Image (cartoon, helix red, strand yellow):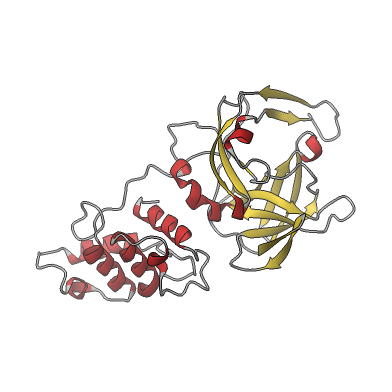
Amino acid sequence: MADMDTGTQIPYFLTATHCIDNSSSAASMDFFWLNRESSCGADDASSVQVSGGATLLHSQGSLDSTLVQINNPPPAGTLMSGWSLESVQAQDDMKGIHHGLGNPKQFAAGTFSNYARLSGTTGGYIVYNDPLGDFFQVHWDQGITSPGSSGSGVWATVDGQRLLKGNLVGGSSSCITPDEADEYARLERFYPYISNWLGTLSTPLQGLLNNSGSLQALTDGVLLGRYLEGIRGAALLTGITDQTIDIAALEDRIAAATANIDIDQDGLSTRNKDALLITRYLMGLRNDSLIEGINLSNSLNNTAQLVSGAIEAFLSGQ
């Protein structure tokens, strides 16, 4: 996976927790790169083996997702994958690439079906359709996955580019049942846990009042809330400052800051959720105190961890 610093080429690697879940297993990893045939069915596959293992960065069992950093660089000819944190829409085109059963590179082509929640059982899990779930299902029109495909990626087309959306958890597709769905973990749900490694070096958001310093709860938090409530002009500054402020420039700064301020990912930008969450965060509230009393039942970011990650991304200018 690529990070958002174009000046580095750090080899990050996404897989499943049920494949790699501790430092020892990460250190034991061997990588077989460019394992592919010259054409479908050519039976002429070769690969480049790179030993040396990897360093575990984070493994999140609840999402069945793990990020490692490969210790020795991949060979020439490999590429860093871009990725996207945008929600996938019904019938979006999806492509899976994997090495099921240890075979040379295979792919499957299909469409996004639905978001889902997984409930673990002995030897497997039950899938529930859930718009707020941490996973999603894909139905294939061509190809399947198979044992050994776990942890492999799936890519969606975003603005004409193939971008990684998550890692394979499991599924029911097979040569006998090719129409059955496979389940993937949502990368956007894993991202708050790994943003320290993949995040951007963009310029942090400046204080709105004077376009300098960091945001402050009792000035910038209030300004964000008032703006989202529809307040404009001098009324934005009531009780905040006696300074002479260029109102037009202030409104421009707030408008830019609030363009993508849907912290809880409920499809809305509001004072009572988004601005309030940011204000609480700026005041130092964390964990349960951050989200206490706020209804997140219809929000994709419905935990303190996910909300904190979204606020950190907002403050960092992402």
The reply, left or right, for residue 173 in relation to residue 264 is right
The reply, left or right, for residue 66 in relation to residue 221 is right
Displayed quadrant of residue 277:
bottom left
Q: Is residue 15 visible?
A: yes
Which residue corresponds to the image point at 64% horizontal and 68% vertical from the top-left? Answer: 130
Q: Where in the figure is residue 188, as x and y percent of width and height?
A: 54, 54
The reply, left or right, for residue 317 in relation to residue 158 is left
Q: Where in the figure is residue 131, as x and y percent of width and height?
A: 61, 68
Which of these two is toward me, 171 or 211?
171
Q: Where in the figure is residue 183, as x and y percent of width and height?
A: 70, 56
Which residue corresponds to the image point at 49% horizontal and 69% vertical from the top-left? Answer: 267
Locate the N terminus by quadrant. top right
Which residue corresponds to the image point at 86% horizontal and 28% vertical from the top-left? Answer: 43
Displayed quadrant of residue 286:
bottom left
Q: Where in the figure is residue 316, as x and y percent of width and height?
A: 35, 50
Which of these two is toward me, 78 or 145?
145
287 to 103, vertically: above or below: below
Which residue corresponds to the image point at 32% horizontal and 49% vertical from the top-left? Answer: 204
Q: Is residue 163 visible?
A: no
215 to 82, vertically: above or below: below
The reply, left or right, for residue 311 in relation to residue 175 is left
